[in-house]
Image: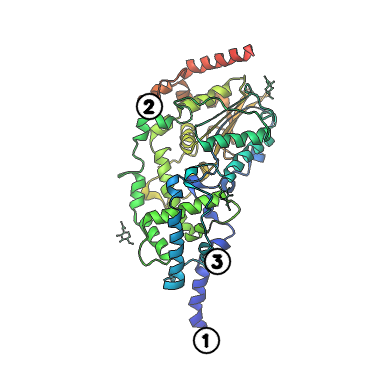
Amino acid sequence: MRLLILLLLPLVAIAQDDYCFSKDTSRLQTRQFSSKTAYQIVKGTDIDKQYLVPGCQPQKMWIFHRHGTRLPKTSMIKKAPRVAELRDLIIKNYQVARTKPETDALCQTDLIAIKLWKWNSSITPDMEEYLTAQGYEDLRGTAKLYQRYYPSVLPPTFNDTYYQFRHTDTQRTTESFKAFAEGLFGSQNDAHPVEIPKQDLLLRPYDYCSSFKDVNYKDEGSEYFKFHQSKLYNDTLADISTRLGFLYNLEEADIKLMYDMCRYEQAWNVDRNSVWCGAFLPEQITVFEYLEDLKYYYGSGYGFPENAHLNCRLVQDLLTHLSNPVSPHVVAHFGHSTGLLTLITALGIQKDDIKLRADNYDSLTSRRWKSSLIDPFAANFVAVKYDCPADLDREKAVFFLNQQAVQLDWCSVGLCKWSDVLEKYKTIADADCGEYYCRTGGAPSLGSGVAGLLATTLAAMLVYLMH
Ligand SMILES: *[C@@H]1O[C@H](CO)[C@@H](O)[C@H](O)[C@H]1NC(C)=O
Ligand SMILES: *[C@@H]1O[C@H](CO)[C@@H](O)[C@H](O)[C@H]1NC(C)=O
Ligand SMILES: *[C@@H]1O[C@H](CO)[C@@H](O)[C@H](O)[C@H]1NC(C)=O
């Protein structure tokens, strides 16, 4: 009897050790999917305490909204058959070849879930990067939420003096705008955006800036490249192959495909588990997250100081509109990940004291730069301007990122003096954006710098008076 117990013990221990995604109630790794994280999983939950500023009235709002959850690129949609092959290989490994590893194997429930996986065949290659139903709900939801907290700033009737909407020239941002408008004004509304210029320097400056495109953020010599070459990363790939029952190392492209399938499916159906997320251990997702964070840190973030200069026009747009007492009272832009990240960087939000590097993965676990929390699908930056009649500094502002008040050390628990805002961003406010960073490519901006700011304000006032 004693012998039997001794013999059984290791088996029991192994069985308990197996991580099981479908039985994990917290599933914290779903908060770590970088730019493919579901908004509903990471959005802030404190806005109900943060939006009310005693003695102050909200006056105006400026929003930059990333599109909601989308479909993948055509190239990935075309790889759906390969995902089905990987599914069959994994099942064969476990059930026929019996190459299940002794530790860190798939639990039975996760294995069966993978066995039953099928690609949604109504997703076809022509639907490249389309907004999904969940993506539509994401933006309808943020509009309704902000309207609930700021009913006086976001009245339920549209007119194009009061509201100014703008989106980029893509299906996913167009649909995101429509979803947002539906959230504010109901399904029968005549909300419309302003025209998209041929060169969209405001919402897509990165498309016209060769110095930005030339930055080495992921090629040889970059921190991304070094982390990708590291033993930790390499071991992670090898461990995943072993976990899935392979006696050889899978191509990285195959692992990436399963990882992307996990991230996308989790974002498309927030309330269900993506079976592919079970293929990975939580700590493996953390390694992938860091690689993504390095990519965005150097590609669009603080990794290179020039990145903070790219979104010059957008920052000026924010400052101009919120400084100006006249309409539009609400400005909302619908754009993309790079636009949001470079805006956050221009504003100095979520900046770490220590640079992210390939070799400080272990010491930066509580870094501020987490693309999953900054830039999930439907990520949104909202600046709210307040009027505080009893204060010496009447004008104040609160910035929200994904429904969480932004903490800047020169503001008081999220509440910033408007005069400090203007002072902090003076360099950008005064810059000629056409010269500030990208001399090549981008056309010189009409009216920029302080003179431009004034000109725009005067023009807006004239338009206002004429109405
Ligand atoms: C499959 O995809 C289509 C198109 O995106 C979507 O409308 C449908 O809800 C999806 N089905 C499931 C079961 O997710
Ligand atoms: C536009 O809407 C705002 C807010 O509801 C309202 O105060 C204003 O009078 C409207 N202007 C026009 C021209 O309808
Ligand atoms: C990566 O792992 C493979 C197999 O596990 C090994 O052959 C190779 O030498 C490793 N490379 C590095 C750079 O660690």
Q: Mark on residue 2?
A: 1
Residue found at the very far left of the displayed protein? 220
Label 2 crowding class (10 Å Cα cut-off): few <14, some 14-19, many 20+? many
* Distance between mark 1 and mark 2 Cα atoms: 76 Å
Give me the C-alpha separation between circle 3 and circle 2. 53 Å
- Quarter holding ligand 3: bottom left
First in sequence: mark 3 or mark 2? Answer: 3
Q: Earlier in the sequence, mark 3 or mark 1?
A: 1
Query: Looking at the figure, which quarter contains the N terminus?
Result: bottom right
Per the model, the C-alpha gap separating discs 3 and 1 is 31 Å
Q: Position of residue 104 (x, y in %)?
A: 46, 66
Pair 3/1: label in front = 3
Q: Which residue is mark 3?
A: 109
Question: Front-most of 393 and 6?
Answer: 6
Disc nearer the start of the sequence (1/2): 1
Three-letter amino acid code at disc 3? Thr
Under mark 1, the amino acid is: Arg
Question: Pointer 1: residues within 10 angstroms few (<14), some, or many (20+)?
Answer: few
Name which quarter of the figure residue 45 lies in. Answer: top right
> Circle 3: is it few (<14), some (14-19), or many (20+) Cα within 10 Å?
some
Tag 2 residue: 438
User: Where residue 372 appears, x then y in whole percent?
Assistant: 50, 46
Relative to 176, 390 lies left or right: right
Image point (55%, 34%), residue name? 174
Q: Nearer the viewer, mark 3 or mark 2?
A: 3
- Residue drawn at x 54%, y 50% as measured from the top left: 122
